Every structure is written in structure tokens, then in C-alpha cells.
Amino acid sequence: MSTATLVETEQPVEVETLPVAPQKVSWFKHAMPTVAFLGRRLLSAAIVLLGATFIVFMALSYALDFLEDLRLSTDPNVELLIAQRIELLNLDTPPFIRYFQWLGGVLTGNFGEGWNQFRGQGVLSMLAARIPSTIQLVLAATIGAILFGVLVGIVSALRQYTRFDYGVTFMSFVLFSLPSFWVAVLLKTWGAIGFNAFLNNPQFSVPVLILVPLLLGGLWSAIVGGTRRSRWITFAIATLATLIAMLLFAFTGWLQNPTLGPAGITVLGLGVAMALVGLMVGFNKPRPEFNPDLPASAVGSASDSAGITESLDSDGADVAARVGRFGGLRGWISANRALCAAVSTVLAIALLYIPFQFAFFTAGLARVLLLALATVVLGVLIGWLWGGFDRRLSMRIAGLTALGTFFFLFVDRVLQMWQFYGSLSQVAGRPISTIGSQTPGVRTSAAVAALGTPFWVTTLDSFTHVILPTIALVLISFASYTRYTRASMLEVMNQDYIRTARAKGLPERVVTVRHAFRNALIPLATIIPLDFAGLLGGAVITEQIFGWSGMGNLFITSIRAQEINMIMGYFLLIGTMLVIGTIVVDFIYALVDPRIRVNA
Amino acid sequence: MKMNRLAAAVASVLVGAFTLAACSSPAPDATAPATTPTAAATAGATGEPGTDTTPAHQSITLAMGTTPNGLTGISPNAANNSISYITQGPGFAFFDPDLNYVRNTDFGTFEEVSTTDNTRTVRYTINDGVTWSDGTPVDAADMILAWASSNNRFVSDGAEWSWASPSFSMGTVSDFPIISDDGRTITFTYNDLRSDWYFQFGSSSQPAHIVARRALGIQDPMEAKQALITAFGGPENYRAQTGTETPHVTTELSTTAGPLTTFVAPNVTEIAQIAEVNNNDWFFTSFPTGNEDLTITMGPYQVVEWVEGEFMRLERNPNFNWYGNVVGRPNVDEITIRFIGDPMAQVQALQNGDVDMIIPQITADTLAAVQNLAGTGVIDYTTPITGTYEHITLAMNNGGVFDPAHWGGNAETARAVRLAFLYTVPREEIVDRLVRPLQSDAVVRDSFTQVPGAPAYAAVTAGNDSAVFNVQDLAQARQLLVDAGLEDQLPLQVRLLFGSNDTRRVDQFELIRAAAPDLFTLVDNGEPAPGWGTTLRSGDGSFDAALFGWGSTSTSPNNAQSNFITGGTNNIGGFHDPEVDRIWDQIITSDSDSEITALTTQMEQRLFQDGFGAVIFQWPGLLAWRANIDNVSAVPFGMQNVWNFWEWQVNH
């Protein structure tokens, strides 16, 4: 029921409706259509919520049996208890009237309270208590599913009709149809029980040492693709690398104390730098055949019409310019400088490893965030110092590299607690947990209190608890993102402007990243906000199986305990989020797709 | 070129980094001041620092399927009650696995003082030296609170209040209890001769002085206790209105009781405040930070940490000192309780070491998983019985085939049809196919009132004719119908009501239906919960037989009375037998265990002979624990696996 309309880009409708001298129109008049649109949508949202809460309330009133526990009671007092219950819950009043009593309460800010399992607990305070753990659980999973799903979807589209594509399609449908309780049980069996046992005796059996590298090698060669020869080379390298890594894990006892150290951080940071430069600038050497004097105007106009959302800031223009006007030479230099900036950032952070450890020693979340910010500023500064034509590009890449490297620095510091954490009596050498969001007693234990800061242990403790449910949620929800992205990417790749972009000689990387990828994301923009809006609903089954007390658990517990006020509070919150989500979708759509305006 | 210089820089830093990593092995700990964790880690591994007990620190983590919603025993929440039992101790008495009612003389004593024709006077004493964890003695005030707060016979002239857990028995106490001079004994009189009096009373789990402090604002504990007693009036202030009935109380069970008293309290405002605090303040779902007085306990443990919906941690109450021969000082220093609703998640948590003891719902899956674990030798398990039993009740007042009205008022024909139908119920097959796979020693339960294994079970089942009637006998069933002249009307239609979302019930229905299709056509009246419970009570005559479970909470038959007497609240099928009513009047007031057993046998014999219904099996349970924990067992009622928590022992 989107009310946004499609309008031709070339004919901005505002021009027709506006007076002759648009510059004299006040901002208010400009904003009027949007405000009216917003007002209408909010009004309809309120009506939707009113109707929905009424339906839900009536359904609950008839479906829930508020006397369930008393029906089979053998208490000689049962009639008195039933009379008390009827009085407590006002069951003599028709549900229709009770709905308006509830609504009246909500409008005056009284959302009621629980009477059974949540006896004496206000609805708002209960929701407030559950939201943080839900966000902790579901936010990471949603972001993970989106990133992973979009990535796999794009690769799958770029490798259309290859074995990789078929494999991804197959896995998508398998994962999509897997029941989450089953995934959860398997994850616990292997990811927690099996992995913990493995940690205590980290030896790979020979079949595992043969099979896992071969599988990973096959996966990588399918992803990287290319000619038969390059596929075999990828396969060989990936297989060998995996084998070596596994042997190193097994023989160095790294898993007992899995820190990265300055060397690991440097290597991983360099990886981030390479990936960023590769994505944002590319390593393509100048190709003489695209050098000749193509008229700048031609390139420019091609670029303009190339992608609907292609930004015409320095970046977009630069891409065209680099290849066309400067014959790739400038692009090469930019890449060179950006790479230099990124690499020097990594090196600078690696050299600061020991100062960082001192800063981390008593750190809490606030200081870690500050340090991250400082690191990014350092990266940006290094990018600025390298300068060159594309100073801003260097700064951006160096800043992002700094962030990535800092992430590994953070992971390294958390992992430094691994051995200590495993040796805590509450953990007893089995770090990965199957239940709950924290190990009871760890946060209050004397051993943790003796540390400079409990932050690193509690972070690790949260991580060992959140990892399995997050994987479960990602596995079952990323499939749909993959399918959406793949379909959307394939559609975009067949557009005329992609052919144009290729025809004018843009490197495939630019075609993919700038022209195809951005436009492929537009359909996703309609799904993702709604997914985030529904995020507060929690994950009923996953929470149940992993023993998390989040919103999903609140919902199911409330239904079982006939806590009608809690269910209504939950429903009102989720309903409101979703209704707002749809409005946000309309605005985002108008934002990312200039053909669409929100004034209809 | 710049690139070359950059490559050189990368190389040198990498070399430096590797060297750094290699030479200072736990690099970060050696270089940063973070060397302390290693030492602390060893301390953490060998024993929790801060506990000076000479033996090694013992801790146990339990899984509970339900989540508590308060630190109180006044709610029906099973987790609350178990946790309250662990923290407060068992009070005056508790059941052991043989269903003996063990008197906890370490805590206090109770005795009957005298009886008249229609009253019984009893005395409860709390031992000297029993204190709350804040040092205040546990005494008569706490017992007065327990009595008053479950007594729905306090009525008011003005303010409105009601108690959260009114108790039938407490309502029959006719006069204000007499408090002894030392303040540790109360004596009160039941205006009723019910024989199960000793299951009915215990001291309050909510300290009277805290209730009074929160309700009336009195800080000094002893003054607060006195104010609470005064608020309820005290013996001298009572205006007893003999013979007045409060509107809600069911009177049907009080056939032997004398005139009942309604207390008109002198100070309704204070009682309303006390009721408000007592009913509500102990309900919360996470640690009551800022209200630590709500965690005060008189037993061996106190709550030190409680994360909403996830876990609760109990540590020793340092002031616990009343342990002795019955309830010993617990061996375990720390008990963590994790709330895990999903049964399979409980099993996997046990396997992963997240918990040490689980009591999941028993299913073929959970049992198989637990048996797998037990095969490795690190887990022990048992399949005890629980307090609920499965049975079939026949409707005799709905105009159906079991109602004499259906046969023109011919009670004998109706009885023959009832007995014939009950003879077709394949009890042994149901137990064999549905229960024994879960609990290998399961038996057909043969008593309407006694749990298998209870002290009186053998005697009752030997004489109640269950050997004749509570069996499958298809020939006998046909013969009864033929003798009643119904041969040409076969098969008769029986509508069976059951909870259809319980697969075990559906399986039972199928087995019963398949048993004798030529005699009875079983109509599936199954409804998913909660609908079937509503239908059961609705009296709409829509079912001829109901298959469901009743729970027991004690070994006394008294609570089952309302299932069988004329007009009883739980007499679903409208059974009516004046002789049964008469025997019940004797059972509930009898003081002699042997007499109760004899009367119960007699009463059950009449039920079986008259075709009241069929008793099938006791629900099985599952309890599994890490094999290095000693002394784990379960009782069918209430406390299940925590009944003897003080005996648990962890062997390292």
C-alpha cells in the first residue's frame, strides 16, 4: 500500500506545480507535500493500530482461558479462588468493554501490569527489561544476515549459472526451510558440546584434515571463478592454506590461547587495506586502449545516465575521469597513494600495539569507543598526509582501514582473556555455552573483580553466549536476502546503462560496485527497514531454545500465562514499529530512487 | 619508487611484529600490566576465592523448567515454591521419596492438643534460636501472619482487601491463636475435624517484621512484629461473629464442622496495608536491588544474584544455624538455578556442562538423549513418578449411555454399561505402550486416592476390588451388556473428552477405541487446551467420558473428597452415592491412619463396583544429574528433586 508514485526523472513535477519564480517559495511550501503526506500516513497508521489492537484484544479475550490453572485444582477452596480471579481480571465485564478500558489506560499512559507470571510487573518496565537482551541477540543476527546474504547474493549473481550459483541456490532453499529448533539443536551439538570437547583435546582426525581443506578449496575456487587454470590455482592455494592453518592450530596449541598479536593484526589489517583499495579504487593498471582522447563531454554524459543513483560527487566523476580523460594514469596513481595510505595506517597501528594494550588495560566500553574514534582520526590524518589528487579518497580508505584494524586489535584484546575465561570455575574449560546470555557468577566473581576491568571478560562471556543463537538466526534468515539480492543484481546487470558503462570502457569492478550494486540495493531498501522494525519482536523459538529472556520469550510466556496486558503491550510496540517502518520505507525509497516522490 | 619503500616498511614491521610475538610469549600480558589475570586464573581454577571453607568449594547448577516470579511461597508457581524451599528450608515437615511425612524437629514441632466433637486444637512451636538472616527470631508473629494471610474469614466493615492465597483449612480456625509467653508457640483451634490438618499449616516465608515494616513503617523488628499481631486484633480484641458465613466460601465440605466464625478486625486500614504488602511485595522477576529486605531468609541459602528470566544464584546464609539431625547443614556452598523452558535444551545444557541437574519433561526424545549421556558414565538419571495420575471419569448426569436416565431410569442397566465400558479400557496395554518405554517399572495405578508407593497404597489396592474391576476383560464386558439385554443395540456410542494437543492422550484414545469396537463406538471429543478444560467444567453434557489427570499434593485422601461426594466441586460426572458421602465424612475427620486406610478402601470399593471410572497410570518424570553429585532423588509431590537439597554432595 505504498503511496509513492513513479515520476519520470527528466520531468521533475515540482517545476510544474510551483510558481514561476521558485526561489521565492518559502521552505514551508516546499515541505508542505511531505508534511501532508506524513500526516496522512501517521493518521492511517493510528487507525491501523486501533483496528489491529481491537482484533488482537478480542481474539485473546476469547482464546485465553484465564481460569485454566483452577479448572483442575483439587483445592477445596476452588470456588473462592475462581471468584477472586474473576474479580481480579474483571472477567464479568464483556471483552468489548474491557478493550476500551485497556485503550483508555493506554491513552492515559497506563499500560497495565501482569497478574500471573509477571504479577506486579508493569508492562512498560517489563518491555524495557527485555529489549536490551533482544537487541543484543537479534541486532547482530539481522546485520549479519543482511551483510552475508547480500554478499553471497551478489557473488552468486556475478557467477550466474555456475556451480557456485547452483550451490548457493540449493543451500538457500535448504536453510530457508530448516526449522530453527532443529538448527539450534545441531548447532549446540557441534558448535558448543563438540567444540568444547575439541578445545580440551585440539586434534584433527586425518579424514577431517583431508576433507575440510578440499571442501574449502572447492568453495574458494567456485567463488573466485575465472578460467579453468585460475580456478585450479585458487583451489590449490586455498586447500593448502587451509591445511596449513589447521595444522598450525593443532600443533601450536593456538586454540588454547588464540590471540592475534601484533603480527596477526598487521597481516589482517593489510588484508583489510587490500580489500578496501581493491573495492574502492581497484588495482587495474592503465590500459592503453582506453587511453585515447575520448571527448570529456561524451564520457561525462555517459556517466550521468549510467546509473540512476550514481552519485555525481568527485568519486563518480573521478572514475570516469580517471579512465577517460587521464587515460587511467591518474587512477593508477590514486590507487597507489590510497594503498600507501592504508598500509601505513595499518603499520602505524601495529607499531602502537603496546600503547594500545596499556590504554585497554582498564578500559570500559566508552574508552574503547573513544579509542576507535581516535584510531579512525589517525587513519584519516595519514590519508591526508599522503595527499595527492585524490586526497579525500585516500583519507576515506585509510580511515576505514584504521577502523578495520582497530576491530582486530579489539578482538585480539578480548581473546587475550580466553585462557583466563576458560579457567574460571564457572566456565570450567567449556567456553561455548548452550544457554542464556551470560555465565552465572562470572560477572560477580572475585577473580574477575581482581582484573583491571571486567569489560574484556564480560565481552568475551557475552560473545561465547551470543555466537550460537546468532549463527542460528543468520543461517535461517540470510537465505531470503541472498535470493532478493541475486534477483535484483541480475536484473540490474541486464540494464542498458550497465552495457553502456562497459562499452565506455569502465573496469568491471567499477561497473559492478558503482553502477550495478548500488541500484541492486534499491529493492532491498524496502525490506530491510521492516526487518529492523520487526527486530524488537525477538525470535520466539531461538530465544526459547537458547534460554534467552528476550521479547520473543516475553511474548510466548505471556500467552502461556494468559498475561493479556503484556501481550497487548508487546503487540502495540511491535505494531507501532512496523507501521513506522513502512513510513520510513517510503521515505527511503524516495531518497534512493529519484524517480519516486512522496507527495502523492 | 614509493612502492618499494612501502614494501620494505611492511616487511620490517612484520618482522618486528613476529619477533615481538615470539620473544614475549604471552605477549600482551608480559608487556601490558595485565599480568594479574594469570594469577587470578589459577585462583579461580582451584577454588572460588573468598570462601574459607576447609573442604573444596562446592557448587551445583540446577535447571528449572519454569521461571520464578517472586521470592515467596504464596503463589502457585512451581519454581517459586522450589526456590523458597531451598532458601527457607522445609519448615515443619516434608515428604521423603517413600512419601513418609517427616517432621523437621530441627526447626520446630507441632502436635494436637485436644479434640472435641467438632473442633481440633493444635499447637505449633518454633525452636529457640531459629532466626531470620537479619538476626530477628522466627516466632509466633510469623505464624500469625501465615494463619491470618490465608484466612478468608477476615471481613471488614469498610476497606476492601483479599488475601492472595486463601486456604480452606485456615478459614476454619475459629478463634485468634493463643500466643505463648515466650512468643514461639501458637495454639489454635480448627472448627473442623479434618484429619489432614498437619499438611495445612507452616510458618510464613515472608518475615512478619518485614511485612509490618513495609506496611506500617515500624523499623524495630520486635515492635513491628507486635504491631502486626495487634493489627490483626490479637485475642483480646476479637469480635467473633459466630455463625456468619462469608459469601465466597464453599460450605459443602464442612458437613462435620461446627459453626464458623467471621473475624471482624479492629483496624481495617492496617490490615488492608498488610494485605497489600504481603500479597504483592515479594513478587518480582529480578534481584530486588534497593529492597534487599525482601531476600531475608530463615533457611540455609539466600539469593545473591538474579538475572531476569535467566538464572538465580544462591549462596549460604551465614546466619543459618538451626540444622541438626533431620535437616543437616548443606554440603553445597553455592546453588545456581537456570530457567530453561525447553526440555531438549535442558538435556543439551547438561551435556555441555552448563547445568548439573535437570528435570525436563519426559518424552521419548529427552529420555533417549539422557540415556545416551548416561551411557558415557558421566550422567545418572532416574524416571520417578510425578504427582499427577491419568484416569477416565464417566458422566452419569448427561443423558448419555452411562446415565440411568438414558435407560429409562434403570440404574442397573446404566451401571452394567459403565462397567462394560470400563472393562474394555486396555489399561495394561496403555501402560505398556505409552508409559513403560519411558519408565520401565511403570504399573497400572489401582487406587483413586493413593499414589503408587505411598504408605497406604498396598493396603488400599488389596481391598478395593481393583483386581476385579480395574482390568481389561472383554468377555465380561460383552456378558454384562448381553445380560442387560442390550445385545441388539451394540455398539453403543461413547463420546470421550480429552486434551487433543497432548499426543499421549490421543494415543490413549486410539488404544481405547481399538479395544472393543463391536461393543463401543468411541467418538473423538478431543479438544485442544484450553477448550477441553472449559468443556469439562461446563456441565453441557457434551461428553460421556473424560480422560484427564488429577494432581495430588499430599498423601491424605482429603483433597480428593470433592471428586466423589454428591455435588462436590470436582465431581465432574455427577456421581451420587450416599454411602460414599457418608464414608467421606468419616475419612476427612479420622485421626487414625489405619482407620483412614480402611475407610478409603471401602470407599474405593464402592467406586469400582459402581463403575465410577478407570484409573490408568501415574505420570512419569525424568531427573538426570552429573554422576559426581551424590544423594539425588525425587519425591512425587511439590518439591520433586530439591526435597533433600541439604544432602547433595559434589565429589571432585
Image (cartoon, grey):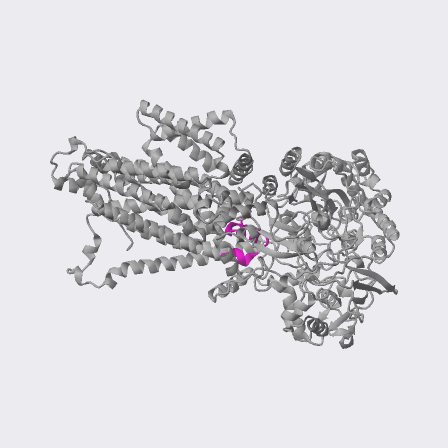
Question: Which of the 4 quarters of the picture holds residue B178?
Answer: bottom right
**B337 vs B385, nearest the viewer:** B337
Furthest residue to the front? B23
- Residue A522 picture location, percent across and down: 31, 44
Secondary structure predominantly adopted by residues drawn in magenta: helix
**B368 vs A486, nearest the viewer:** B368
The C terminus of chain A sits in image quarter: bottom left
Left or right relative to B640: residue B49: left
Q: Give the range drawn in magenta.
A: A547-569
User: Does the segment drawn in magenta span residue A555?
Assistant: yes
Q: Does the image show residue B474?
A: yes
Q: Does the image show residue B281?
A: no
**A421 vs B435, nearest the viewer:** A421
- Residue B510 picture location, percent across and down: 67, 37
- Residue A405 picture location, percent across and down: 36, 44
| For residue A156, above or below residue B581 | above
Residue at screen point 17% across, 60% down: A22
- Residue A293 picture location, percent across and down: 11, 36
Question: Which of the 4 quarters of the picture holds residue B588?
Answer: bottom right
User: Does the segment drawn in magenta span residue B261?
Assistant: no
| For residue A527, above or below residue B582 | above
Left or right relative to A201: residue B573: right
Marker count (numbered): 0
